[in-house]
Image (tube, rainbow, N blue to C red):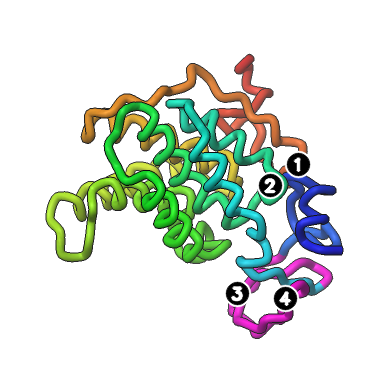
């Protein structure tokens, strides 16, 4: 069975794409072979039956984001990313969210009147976001969804390591998103952290860039039953906390 077929049969499924067993995280990286493409690389992540899936295979089909975003008219990045989350390539957790957050923000920013070379920006967020590996939230101390807001801001501002204000803005954006993620704490939830990061970015862009993306009045998560580590009422988007 191909990874695309698995995606169609198990949209938004979590854990191992091969056997659906839980993932385990190792203290030290070991050489593993991807169960799909057979590439060998060091990793700290595998399922409890020993299967390893590389980032490239895990996110196969993610290029569908480009076509979707080019046609999208919404100014609400939460609505945009939720539509991305329903596409076959997207799982409950995974490095695809490291691209999706930035892509949703770029799209809503463009639709809200922000000026940018949109096709080039989308390709750049795909390239940069794809370089942030799965598990960065736990192993780097920086969730890829939060980093994706900094990638978004760095693309908007034309930041480079030698720039002044753009350099500062992109760091402040990432810091704001990571702070909101850290306030809730773990364990990881790619949906929760994506929503938190986008909400932080909406506020930051309004205050610092003068572009008003649409902010939803409430967000009620529909993924809790698919997340074995769901934190329930501690999550600000949990349906159990009274948001209806």
* Residue 226: assigned label: 1
Q: Secondary structure beneath disc 3?
A: strand
Q: Which residue is mark 2?
A: 92
* CA gap, disc 2 and disc 1: 7 Å
* CA gap, disc 3 and disc 4: 25 Å
Q: Badges 2 and 1: C-beta atoms under 8 Å apart? A: yes
Q: Badges 3 and 2: C-beta atoms under 8 Å apart? A: no
Q: Nearer the viewer, mark 4 or mark 1?
A: 4
* CA gap, disc 3 and disc 2: 23 Å
Within 10 Å of disc 1 (Cα), the crowding (few <14, some 14-19, many 20+) is: some
* CA gap, disc 2 and disc 4: 22 Å
Q: Main secondary structure of the magenta part?
A: strand
Mark 4 or 1, nearer chain start:
4
* CA gap, disc 1 and disc 3: 26 Å
* Residue 37: assigned label: 4
Q: Nearer the viewer, residue 51 or 75?
A: 75
Task: Confirm whether the magenta stretch covers residue 32.
Answer: yes
Q: Nearer the viewer, mark 3 or mark 4?
A: 4
Is 79 left, or right, of 54 in this rendering? left
Q: Badges 4 and 1: C-beta atoms under 8 Å apart? A: no
Q: Which residues are magenta?
A: 24-49
Q: Position of residue 49 (x, y in %)?
A: 83, 70
Q: Nearer the viewer, residue 93 or 123?
A: 123
């Amino acid at each position: 069975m191909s990874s695309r077929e698995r995606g169609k049969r198990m949209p938004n499924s979590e854990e191992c794409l091969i056997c659906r067993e839980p993932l385990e995280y190792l203290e030290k990286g070991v050489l593993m072979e991807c169960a799909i493409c057979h590439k060998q690389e060091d990793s700290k992540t595998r399922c409890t039956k020993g299967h390893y899936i590389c980032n490239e295979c895990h996110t196969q089909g993610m290029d569908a984001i480009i076509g979707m975003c080019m046609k999208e008219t919404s100014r609400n990045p939460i609505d945009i990313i939720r539509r991305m989350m329903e596409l076959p390539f997207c799982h409950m957790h995974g490095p695809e969210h490291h691209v999706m957050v930035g892509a949703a923000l770029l799209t809503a920013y463009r639709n809200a009147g922000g000026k940018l070379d949109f096709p080039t920006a989308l390709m750049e967020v795909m390239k940069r976001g794809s370089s942030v590996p799965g598990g960065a939230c736990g192993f780097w101390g920086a969730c890829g969804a939060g980093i994706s807001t900094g990638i978004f801001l760095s693309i908007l501002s034309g930041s480079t390591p030698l720039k002044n204000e753009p350099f500062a803005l992109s760091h402040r954006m990432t810091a704001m998103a990571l702070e909101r993620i850290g306030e809730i704490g773990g364990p990881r939830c790619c949906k929760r952290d994506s929503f938190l990061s986008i909400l932080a970015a909406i506020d930051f862009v309004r205050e610092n860039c003068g572009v008003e993306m649409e902010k939803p009045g409430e967000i009620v998560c529909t993924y809790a039953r698919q997340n074995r580590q769901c934190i329930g009422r501690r999550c600000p988007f949990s349906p159990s906390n009274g948001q209806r």
